Image: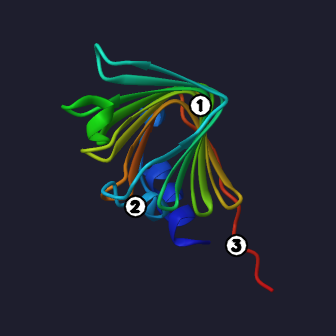
């Protein structure tokens, strides 16, 4: 059994039945450098200089290093100085959200990415996969700095044993 699968399995076994609603898990593939430039592609863009935001809609794709986020709509909020300064403070995604980094992927209905802290909060029918292992719940928090994730809300999992060749 892989290192991550073993950690998930032991975490689940160590929790009492009522506490299966949450689990803290190591997900090293989500370790990420938030100082890298952010690239965004979408069907449309609406800028609002009054609050320093940009709304991207229609097949939105965001890339920062190996981290990828896709959604129907992503609102980008810039740090002080607005869009002209170019530094992204946070992103809020809605509708068919997909976050990937290497072999790990997380799906949800909504997500918020705080670029400076490197934290992602996802909610609404969250599905997290790593290889053949799958976790489902209602909310997921990922710390991209440490590579840890915490799933909450009636957590369910499918763990597949490692197949020997």
Whether pointer 3 and pointer 2 mark residues with C-beta atoms closer than 8 Å, the reply is no
Q: Secondary structure at mark 1?
A: strand
3D distance between C-alphas at marks 3 and 2: 23 Å
Determine which of the numbered discs, if any, sits on residue 108 in the image: 1
User: 85 or 21, which is in the foreground?
Assistant: 85
First reached walking from the N terminus: tag 3 or tag 2: 2
Where residue 92 sits, quadrant-wise, is: top left
Residue that appears at 25% across and 44% down: 116
Residue that appears at 30% across and 23% down: 52
Determine which of the numbered discs, if any, sits on residue 31 in the image: 2
Residue that appears at 48% across and 35% down: 20
Residue found at the far left of this picture: 80
User: Where is residue 126 shown, x and y percent of the image?
Assistant: 58, 33
Residue found at the far front of this picture: 84
User: Where is residue 123 shown, x and y percent of the image?
Assistant: 50, 26
| 72, above or below 24, in the image | above
3D distance between C-alphas at marks 3 and 1: 27 Å
3D distance between C-alphas at marks 1 and 2: 19 Å
């Amino acid at each position: 059994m892989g290192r991550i699968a073993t950690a998930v399995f032991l975490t689940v076994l160590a929790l009492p039945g009522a506490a299966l609603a949450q689990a803290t898990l190591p997900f090293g593939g989500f370790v990420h450098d938030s100082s890298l430039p952010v690239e965004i592609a979408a069907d449309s863009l609406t800028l609002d200089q009054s609050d320093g935001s940009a709304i991207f809609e229609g097949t939105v794709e965001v890339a920062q290093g190996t981290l990828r986020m896709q959604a129907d709509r992503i609102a980008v909020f810039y740090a002080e100085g607005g869009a002209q300064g170019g530094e992204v403070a946070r992103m809020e995604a809605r509708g068919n959200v997909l976050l990937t980094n290497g072999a790990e992927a997380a799906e949800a209905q909504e997500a918020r990415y705080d670029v400076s802290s490197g934290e992602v909060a996802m909610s609404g029918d969250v599905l997290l996969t790593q290889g053949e292992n799958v976790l489902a719940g209602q909310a997921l928090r990922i710390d991209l700095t440490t590579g840890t994730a915490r799933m909450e809300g009636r957590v369910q999992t499918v763990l597949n044993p490692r197949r020997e060749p």
